Amino acid sequence: MKNVLVTRGTKGIGAAISEALCKDGFRVAAIFNSDRKAADHLTEKVQSSHLKVLQTDVSDYAAVQELAIEVKAVKFLIENDFVTGQTIHINGGLFFTQIKSPPNMNFLYTNQT
């Protein structure tokens, strides 16, 4: 079974990605920053042992270091970030790949404006 990490994985496009991957048999670590209600909603909706919802501030390098210890053998990293003005927020994926980037990990970037 392959492990996938989805940043902003509990709302909107990220939640849809997390849910679909769980249904397809992937183990998903869906990352969220502060919206516990959305995280709980996704957990209730998916009801799968393949889903692990984790609260992490992916803009904080130390927090991403802790996340990298908690998640094991990530095969796919889906960087589901957003744009505010002209700034694209992709720190989480960049930090994660700097800390824990096996040679066979795949990276996918999605954008929510």
Image: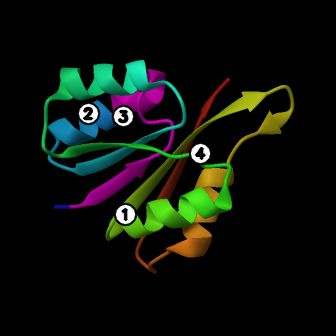
**Residue 63 colored magenta?**
no
Task: Identify the residue under disc 3.
Answer: 17
User: At label 4, which amino acid type do we have?
Assistant: Asp
101 up-or-down from 112: above or below = below
Task: Identify the residue under disc 2.
Answer: 20
Task: Say which element carries label 4.
Answer: loop
> Which circle's residue, 2 or 1, is located before the other in the chain?
2
> Which circle's residue, 4 or 3, is located before the other in the chain?
3
6 up-or-down from 63: above or below = above
Q: Residue at horizontal 31%, vertical 24%?
A: 40
Within the image, what quadrant is residue 51 found in? top left
Q: Is residue 77 left or right of residue 1?
A: right
Q: Residue at horizontal 62%, vertical 63%?
A: 62
Asked whether the residues under the numbered discs 3 and 2 touch, taking CB atoms below 8 Å apart as contact, a structural biologist would say yes
How far across and how far down the image is residue 103, in percent? 46, 80
How far across and how far down the image is residue 5, in percent? 40, 52
Task: Identify the residue under disc 4.
Answer: 57
Q: Which residues are magenta?
A: 2-17
95 up-or-down from 46: above or below = below
Q: Could you tell me how far apart the alpha carbons at marks 1 and 3 are, in whole angstroms?
A: 21 Å
Number of residues whose C-alpha sits closer than 10 Å to that of mark 1, classed few (under 14), some (14–19) or many (20 or more): few
User: At label 2, which amino acid type do we have?
Assistant: Ala
Task: Say which element carries label 3.
Answer: helix
* Quadrant the N terminus occupies: bottom left
Task: Identify the residue under disc 1.
Answer: 70
